[in-house]
Image: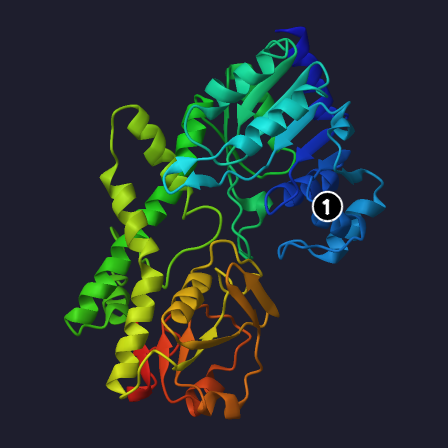
Amino acid sequence: MKEAFRELQDKIRSKEAKVAVVGLGYVGLPLALAFVKAGFCVSGIEVDKDRLAHIRQKCSYISDITDTELKKAHATGRFTASGDFQALKGSSVVLICVPTPLKRKYQPNISYIKQAVKSIAGNLKRVSLVILESTTYPGTTEEVILPLFESCGLRHGEDFYLGFSPERIDPGNKAYSLARIPKIIGGIDKEATQLCSLAYQKIIRKVVPVSSARAAETAKLLENTFRLVNIGLIDELAMMCHKMKIDIWEVIEAAGTKPFGFMPFFPGPGVGGHCIPKDPLYLYWKARHHGFKSRFIKLAAEMINSMPEYVVDRVEEGLGKRSLRLKDAKCLVIGVTYKKDIKDLRKSPSIDIIDILQKRGARVCYFDPLIPYLKLNHINLRSVGLKKELLRQTDCVLIATDHSEIDYGLLLRHSPFIFDSRNVYKGRGGGKVDFL
C-alpha cells in the first residue's frame, strides 16, 4: 500500500484532514456544513461577493440551510469562508462544486470546472484528495481534470488522488436530506475510490462505489435523463389528451393504481432548476462525439422547452372561449420559482411564460410569496397583493407554481378565469378553471 494512500486514509479516519469546498451554492454549502458537523475543519471558497457577504453575516441564501445552522457552523470555529483560493492551502480533501451551464443549446460549458482546477492546483497540498461534484459529461474527470493537474507537475497516486461523486441534492425535500441520499463514488483508480468512500462515509449514511469516474458521471446523467424523457412524454400526452377531450390528470391517477411497472409523472408548464433542463444535454453532446445521436434526449428536451409557449397558447384559447383577446388582457401569474415552496428562479418556466405573455401584448402581473420582485431580462415587476378587487379585474389567473402559502380558495371565488397548470383545483372549478 502506497505511503500517500495510508497518510490520507489515516487523516480522514481521524478527522485531522482539513476539507475545502470550492463553490458554496446549493450543493457546496450543505456539504461544507455537513463536514463541519461531523467534526472536520472546513474552508469554503466562494468567488461570488454577495454569497460571501451573506455567509460572513451568518445569513443563509439557501432554503435548505437555516441561519441557525450557519451560525452554529461559525460558532464551532471550524468553518471559514473566503474568496481567495489560498485559503485551501493545507487542505487534504478538496470538493469542487461549481456551476456547469450550457454555452449554447446543446454545448456544455465546463469553464468553471477548468478555472477551479487551475486555481486549486496552484494551492494544492501534496498528498490530497480532490473530488468533483459538479454534473458533467462522461470522461471529464479523467480526460480534462486529471491532465490539468498533471500539467502542473502533480502525479496521481503520489501527490493527489482524484474522483467524481455526483451531487444528488433535491432542494426542499424534507424526506431526503443530504445525509440520507446514497452517494455514488467513482475514482480514477481503486485507491481513489476507496478514499472518496471513506471521506463521504463521515457525512453520508450509504456510499455506492462504482468501477470508474466515467460510470459515476454517466449514472448521474441517467438519473436526470430518465426524468427528462418521462416528463417530456407526459407533456406530449397532456397535449394529446386535450385535443381528444380527455382529462390527463384522471388518466395518470388511474394508471397509478397499477402496483408494478408504472411510475407516475405529471405535466407542467416546463422544467427549471439546475439539473433536468441541461444535464441530459451533456450526455447528448458527448454521445455525438462518439458518432451516436440520442433522439430521445433531444426530443424530450424540445418538448419540455415548448411548454411555456403551449401554456400561453392555452391561456389564449381559454380567453377566446370567453370572448376575450390575449392582447391587452390582464393576466396574473401565480408563482414564479421553478419549484413549489423553493426560493429559486433558476431556469424557471414561469419567467418564460411572463416574457411570452408580455411579447404577445398581455398586461402581466404576478404573485409569489417568496419572490418580492423580478428584474430579469426584459421583466421588471413587483409581486402584487392578492386582493379580491384585483382578482375581479383580472382576465386570467395562471397558476404556474403551486406554492403552499397561497389562498387558492380566494382565487377561485373572485377570479373570472383560471388556467391551472398544476392541477391545484382537481375536480373543482366548474367552467371557471381550464386545466393543462
Q: Residue at x 67, y 13 (%)?
A: 6
Quick check: 280 left or right of 5?
Answer: left
The x, y position of residue 385, in whole percent, is 58, 82
User: Quadrant where the C terminus lies?
Assistant: bottom left
User: Quadrant where the N terminus lies?
Assistant: top right
Quick check: 124 left or right of 265?
Answer: right
Badge 1 amino acid: Lys
Q: Residues within 10 Å of mark 1 (few under 14, many from 20)?
A: few
User: Please, is residue 250 above or below residue 232 in the view?
Assistant: below
Q: Residue at x 39, y 44 (%)?
A: 224
Residue 251, image quadrant: bottom left
Find disc 1 in the rendering and name its residue: 49
Quick check: 119 left or right of 286?
Answer: right
- In the depicted view, which residue is nearer to us: 186 or 176? 186
Circle 1 SS class: helix
User: Please, is residue 295 above or below residue 165 in the view?
Assistant: below
